[in-house]
Image (cartoon, rainbow, N blue to C red):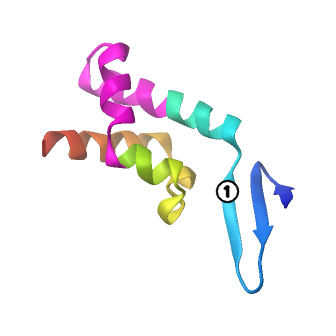
Amino acid sequence: MILYHGYYLTCRKRDVVMTANKTLLQRKYARVIETFAQKKDIPLREVLDTFYKSLTYIEIRDGISDMHCCSDEYLADKLCLETASV
């Protein structure tokens, strides 16, 4: 496993899997949560619950489509759309 710009590269037979550094992910979550709270004008405690139960969080956490590489603003907007449909 090789650390490369905050990401871990794992080399297997024919594929390279990129996994975000856990500390960087935690900081990303905090920025997305704060941006979402500002957009919706709701308390951080309520946003925390919403974020950690969202599909957006799961996609970032699991590295689906490199969601952790998207901007905080984009992810907050995605979370807004996701919660609007609930």
Position of 23 with respect to 78 (left or right) is right
Number of disc labels: 1
Specify start and end residues of the magenta stretch as a single range: 31-55
Magenta: predominant secondary structure element? Answer: helix
**Can residue 70 be spotted in the picture?**
yes
Q: Nearer the viewer, residue 28 or 49?
A: 49
Residue found at x 69% / y 35%: 23
User: Which residue in the structure is indicated by mark 1?
Assistant: 19
Near mark 1 (Cα within 10 A), the count class, few <14, some 14-19 or many ≥20, is some
On screen, residue 61 above or below 1: above
Position of 29 with respect to 15 (left or right) is left
On screen, residue 71 above or below 35: below
Residue found at x 51% / y 34%: 29
Residue found at x 42% / y 28%: 33
Corner quadrant of residue 73: top left
Residue found at x 76% / y 48%: 6
Corner quadrant of residue 16: bottom right
Kind of element beneath mark 1: strand
Residue 21 rendering spot, x and y as whole percentages: 71, 45
Position of 71 with respect to 43 (left or right) is right
Residue 39 rendering spot, x and y as whole percentages: 30, 27
In which quadrant of the rendered image does the C terminus lie? top left
Q: Does the magenta stretch include residue 54?
A: yes
